[in-house]
Image (cartoon, grey):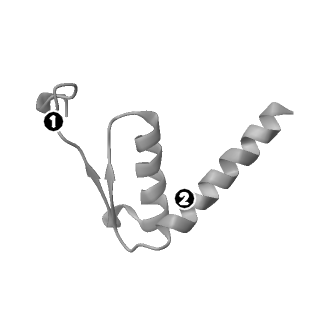
Amino acid sequence: MAIAHNAGVLAEKKHSLLQYLGRFDKVGVALSGGCDSSFVLAFSCHVLGKDNVIAVTAATRLQLANDF
């Protein structure tokens, strides 16, 4: 039962993200390299087309420029 509930929650979140992205022609996604921002980046490319999405990263003490 928990798996079905989780699948429903994930489907709702995906639908909400689809509606949100539908408000834009182009987006920039802050990419941390984690699974959440990677999913948002990939889903944004799926919804808007890769030419309408840019990944934004920044060098920090935790993520250095030569890591990119």
Give the residue at the far top of this rendering. Answer: 62
Specify the quadrant that holds the N terminus.
Answer: top right
**The quadrant where residue 63 appears:** top left
- Look at the numbered discs 1 and 2 and tell me whether their residues touch, using CB distance below 8 Å: no
Looking at the picture, which amino acid does disc 1 mark? Ala
**Residue furthest out toward the left:** 66
Left or right side of 67 for 3: right
Q: Tag 1: Cα neighbours inside 10 Å, few (<14), some, or many (≥20)?
A: few
Residue 5 spot, x, y in % from top left: 79, 40
**Residue at x 34%, y 53% (from the top left corner):** 29
Residue drawn at point x = 60 percent, y = 60 percent = 16
* In the image: residue 63, left or right of residue 13: left
Q: Secondary structure at mark 2?
A: helix
Classify 58 as above or below 63.
Answer: below
Name the foreground residue: 66 vs 5. 5
- The amino acid at mark 2 is Leu
Left or right of 6? Residue 40 is left
**x and y percentages locating residue 44 in the rendered image:** 44, 58
User: Circle 2 is placed at which residue position?
Assistant: 17
Tell me residue 30's x, y (percent): 31, 48
Q: Residue furthest front?
A: 61
Q: Name the residue: 12% across, 33% down.
A: 65
**Which badge, 1 or 2, comes first in the chain's sequence?**
2
Residue position for label 1: 59
Question: What is the x, y in percent for residue 23?
Answer: 47, 74
Which quarter of the figure has residue 60? top left
Asked if residue 46 is positioned above or below residue 35 in the image, the reply reads below
Check disc 2: other Cα within 10 Å, few if <14, some if 14-19, many if 20+. some
Quadrant position of residue 25: bottom left
Dot 1 falls on a residue whose secondary structure is: loop
**Left or right of 29 in this view: 36:** right
